[in-house]
Image (tube, coloured by chain):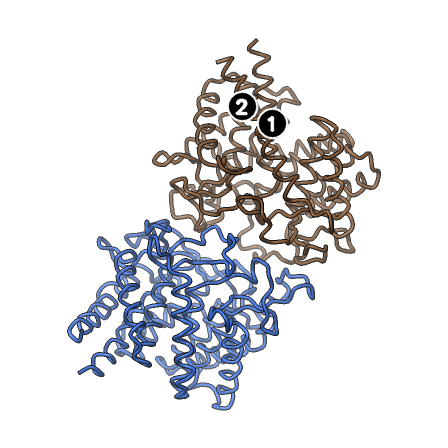
Chain colours: A brown, B blue
Amino acid sequence: MNQKLSNLAELYKNTLLDNIIPFWSQHSIDWENGGYFTCLDRKGNIYDTDKFIWLQNRQVWTYSMLYNRLEPRKEWLNIAQNGAEFLAKYGRDTEGNWYFALDRTGQPLVQPYNIFSDCFAAMAFSQYALASEDESAKEIALQAYNNVLRRQDNPKGHYNKAYPGTRSLKSLAVPMILANLSLEMDWLLQSSQLEAVLDQTLQEVMEDFLDPDRGLMYENVTPEGKHWDCFDGRLINPGHGIEAMWFVMDIANRRQDRSLINQAVDVVLNILNFGWDTEYQGIYYFMDAQGHPPQQLEWNQKLWWVHLETLVALLMGFNLTGRQECLDWFQKVHDYTWGHFSDSNYQEWFGYLDRKGEVVLNLKGGKWKGCFHVPRALYLCWQQLETLNSTLK
Amino acid sequence: MNQKLSNLAELYKNTLLDNIIPFWSQHSIDWENGGYFTCLDRKGNIYDTDKFIWLQNRQVWTYSMLYNRLEPRKEWLNIAQNGAEFLAKYGRDTEGNWYFALDRTGQPLVQPYNIFSDCFAAMAFSQYALASEDESAKEIALQAYNNVLRRQDNPKGHYNKAYPGTRSLKSLAVPMILANLSLEMDWLLQSSQLEAVLDQTLQEVMEDFLDPDRGLMYENVTPEGKHWDCFDGRLINPGHGIEAMWFVMDIANRRQDRSLINQAVDVVLNILNFGWDTEYQGIYYFMDAQGHPPQQLEWNQKLWWVHLETLVALLMGFNLTGRQECLDWFQKVHDYTWGHFSDSNYQEWFGYLDRKGEVVLNLKGGKWKGCFHVPRALYLCWQQLETLNSTLK
């Protein structure tokens, strides 16, 4: 087992450094206009030049994070800077809200309707500020973070189509991302502010969104944490719930809260038992809590990030609790993930498979898949495997 | 051939009257609150009670249309009335704009962000006014029609997320639905108004959205009818383009414009050659004009309405031009459609298949599939087959 885990650490590390990162460094950088091309086909050819703010910021984060945590390579900082300067110049409206999309040259295409554009900007500029020691990056990070706090109760503003009062629902995505973001920014936040945000998000996620009877994480609940029997109210997004649980483990570990760690691991295992496709393997994208047809036509597809976030959660869960179920599931999800998403002919990974595991979209990057989930998960799994190896020695 | 077509006319007629309509009459009527349940599982059990305005109005239209054109059955008028009265009472905001969704009792859930809610209201209340001879229904139809005309240049109002000026695109759906709607309402409109709207929509559809070189219908073009090289600008929705072409044939036939009829048939055949899945059969849902990965994850699914609208277009095209290609394609699409969407164990049809033809969502009705495309297409195909039979006799 020890030998095997050591090989696995090498596999995750080498894939990150020799396959994934070189793919993005080589194909995605727009040295002319700044920013990144994320719409890349199987071989890395650019098929669309629009710049989606989520992915632009996430790529700044990835390169800055590698520079900060792994090795201060000048090349990585240059690439992060190429995105950060483009985004600082073009990414926000006059009120400091982050657009959703820009064209290649930086002209705005889609209005700032989406709070997660600000979330990923805060994440990106916080990491980049650490890497570059640039004071203005720090300010941009804090401004974006304050946008998120200000907008969290009405994330879509006047773009919200829900009629007020008939059926109030809040979304798991908001507290979940806030938890992860606040930990990311701990070096920039006052300790009391950070702890208050963490308290609030833990309470919301583990009491309002977690169904105590079923141990499942719901995507949408009432402000009081109750269920609505409607499409949105019945929605389960297994990958999202599992990702939220490793954010929770991260916070719980920081607070040395063993009980919360164990609870988060329980939820991961419950979601996996619920969301695993026993016929064709892999984890479903969307499910209905009551087994009704979901409204998402792509519900039974297998997505790269769902599986990668699950690998992170399982390794973290095993490292923190030693529970064998985590390792058993890790092996199963690892085999599926490496067997289906990694591309044996070209660099980077496929993102979208049908239920049976065949490629649905023959791309390595697009509007939603960029330089983020694959490198982040490979990095985190590699680190977890190293920790595990050193424990077992 | 003559015998075969006569059998086919019976098949379409009997399926409509003995299978499809009884399914909706039996399972979908909310006699308690008014309106219809459209979320029905494979056997007709209700799994969700929300009321989506598109589908509510479409069901009023279907039952009114059957009453008007087929047979004045009291039962059909009662069912139409049960929806129309619910919608007249709860469907609109104080300014007369149609909401997108209501709950079971009629309380608004989703704001009037969508111009097609008004379109389908106009269609529904126009047919219902003919059936019921109710003056207030006529007024509701005209009010909705005027909403559509007023909103056509800015269909989403303040819900529009596009940043103004960077990349203006207009959508095929607006002129296309306006053409069909205006013909539906010809008895309520002044002839000069009707002809002016038809002129405008024909010009837009056949000059701006139709690419003359490729003979393909694009979903989104610039206000001047040019292409943008972006996801929306490259989008082809084969079923939508084909449906638009039978609307055009309808207008061209009314105007006895042989050249326009032939052009519309050419486009149908071009789209079919482009959108047909030669490996697994069936017509793709979304495609990229340049062969790049589309942004829609469900792009390679096979949807019921796409195939049914195609059957209507092909029979209409054959009746109007006698072109053999129409009949050859009709046979091929007919075989696929009846072989995959119709359910040999229970009433009504499946709506959503994966690329290989397996059922993705095991439902007969949902948020988008209601009592509309199946009955309308079966009715129209039956009528076309009758016409064809009488011509061949």
Vertical arrangement, residue B220 with respect to residue B175, above or below: above
- The total of numbered circles placed on residues is 2
Q: Is residue B342 left or right of residue B302?
A: left
Q: Give B127 or B86, whichever is nearer the viewer.
A: B127
Residue A213 is at least partly visible in this image: no
Badge 2: residue crowd in 10 Å (few <14, some 14–19, many ≥20): many
Is B20 placed left or right of B271 in the picture? left
In the displayed structure, B344 sits above or below B386; it is: above
Q: Secondary structure at mark 2?
A: helix
Residue linked to disc 2: A315
Q: Can you give x and y, in whole percent of width and height, for residue A62 in the image?
A: 67, 36
Q: Residue furthest left?
A: B3
Q: Is residue B194 shown to the viewer in this render? A: yes
Residue B37 placement: quadrant: bottom left
Earlier-in-chain disc, 2 versus 1: 2
Q: Are marks 2 and 1 on the same chain?
A: yes
Which quadrant would residue A161 be assigned to in this image?
bottom right
Q: Is residue A201 left or right of residue B369?
A: right
Q: What residue is shown at x 22% (from left), y 53% (from top)?
A: B345
Above or below — where is B365 with respect to A26? Answer: below
Q: Position of residue A102 (x, y in %)?
A: 68, 55
- Name the residue: 51% across, 67% down: B218
Secondary structure beneath label 1: helix
| Nearer to me, B369 or B127 | B369
Kindly identify the amino acid type of the residue bearing the numbered disc 2.
Leu
- How far apart are the alpha carbons under marks 2 and 1? 9 Å
Mark 2 in CB contact with mark 1 (< 8 angstroms):
yes
Q: Which of the labelled discs sits on residue A3, or is there none?
A: none
Q: Which residue is mark 1?
A: A380
Indicate left or right for A320 with B194 as reference. right
The one of B130 and B388 positioned closer to us in this rendering:
B388
